[in-house]
Amino acid sequence: MNELAWGTNNDLNDNQFYNRFEDIEFISNLLKSSRYGTSPSILLTGFRGVGKSALMKKIQKNFRDENYLIVYIDLSASNAYQTDEFSRESIIELIYDQIINECREVGITTVDNKIEKYIKTHDVALKEIVNINGYPVPFLWTKRNYKKLANFVMELPQYLYDEYDENINGIFLFFDEFQIIKELGDDLTDFLWYMRSFIQKQNNVSYVFSGSMSVKDSLIEEIAGSNGAFGGRILTIEIKPFSYETTKNYLNDNAEYLKFTKDGFDQFYNCTKGIPFYINIFGNLLPRNVNLDSDSVKENFIKFLPVLAMHFSNSWFRLSLQEQKILTTLLDESLNRSGIAKKLRVTSGAIGRSLNRLQDNGLIEMENNNYCIPNFVFKAWLKNEYETKGVYPYKSI
């Protein structure tokens, strides 16, 4: 009997991965054009939890045996990110490390010439000659040259293709958790334009960017907007939630033990909105082999809200009090900046930094010039906290 994957698992096996046939075929056909020198750059968008990362990994698996060099770069795996030292240089280092790791995996070892890389990415000069036991020993003076390092790494994919074109049909660089790049702050725009300057000159290298970004994330405008770094030069593909019928078929195939009545399934779909992350988590938490009507589904949804909203509740308790209060003002209606400030009884300028931080964290977004909370589970969790306790959880205990 098949089982539902947990929502936190993006590396799905063939039984767990469901549907997306048209998305897979469309994206795969685009990527295959790298073999003929017309490589696309692709940005995957969609609701948080809709399955962008799982889709990307599925496409990677499908290409493994077709002589493509596939480099997977998870920005959240950067040691610099984990230690709050995230920078342009740390991204370049991560790209280099993942390219080299993949080359080793497929047997391309000659590229990992550390001396060549060292000379190319450092300024080297003779510091002094020291006499040791009668032998003159030269001591080199070195200084890390970020520009040389970055140029070397960004040129490396096309260089690899040119060197190994008899064995490689094309090269794909998959960037996951790409929303983390917003932590570059003031360096973000410059770095995106810097990447573009190399990517647009590479004929046999395709780039795919994905991460926890909704369709209205501010980063998407920075990347693909009319004035963005890749504006007009990147294909934006929205990955949509499962339809009502697809969700029903998915559960019938993988969770026969969930016995929904008609109104029970309607309520389940309303609670999950067809987003695989919530379908899988909620489906795994529901009782098995019992009749699930609308009331029981709704009752379990409220019961398991702390689990379903865990990512958001963790983010909530790291926010400032002002940021939390901005969110509570947006629970029932969308507001512009002045409207939020009026409700908080502060000046409009006093909340600018908080609004930017909430946007960067994906907790709010702009819709028709108003701010709103895009995630329905997060909103439901906050409302339920107030209804059950009479106060919002501004402080953790």
Image: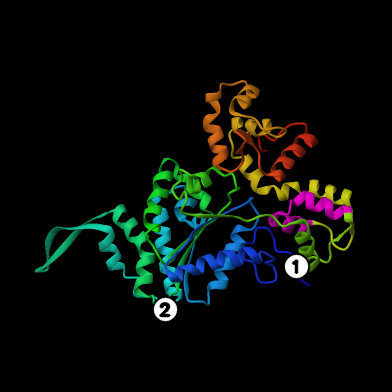
Q: Could you tell me residue 347's position as x and y percent?
A: 56, 21
Asked whether, in this view, residue 253 is left or right of residue 179, the answer is right
Real-space CA distance between mark 1 and mark 2, rounded to the nearest whole angstrom = 39 Å
Residue that appears at 62% across and 27% down: 340
Secondary structure beneath disc 2? loop
Over which residues does the magenta segment extend? 263-285
Q: Could you tell me residue 203's position as x and y percent?
A: 40, 65
Instruction: Name the image quarter holding residue 112.
Output: bottom left
Please, what is the three-letter code of the amino acid marked with disc 1? Glu
Q: Can residue 89 be seen in this view?
A: no
Above or below, 148 against 351 in this view is below
Instruction: Name the image quarter holding residue 119.
Output: bottom left
Q: Earlier in the sequence, mark 1 or mark 2?
A: 1
Please, what is the three-letter code of the amino acid marked with disc 2? Asn
Quickly name the residue at label 2: 167
On-image quarter of the N terminus? bottom right
Q: Can residue 50 be seen in this view?
A: yes
Above or below, 236 against 54 in this view is above
On-image quarter of the C terminus? top right
Instruction: Name the image quarter holding residue 24.
Output: bottom right
User: Is residue 354 rendered magenta in the image?
Assistant: no
Asked whether, in this view, residue 32 is left or right of residue 367, the answer is left
Quickly name the residue at label 1: 3
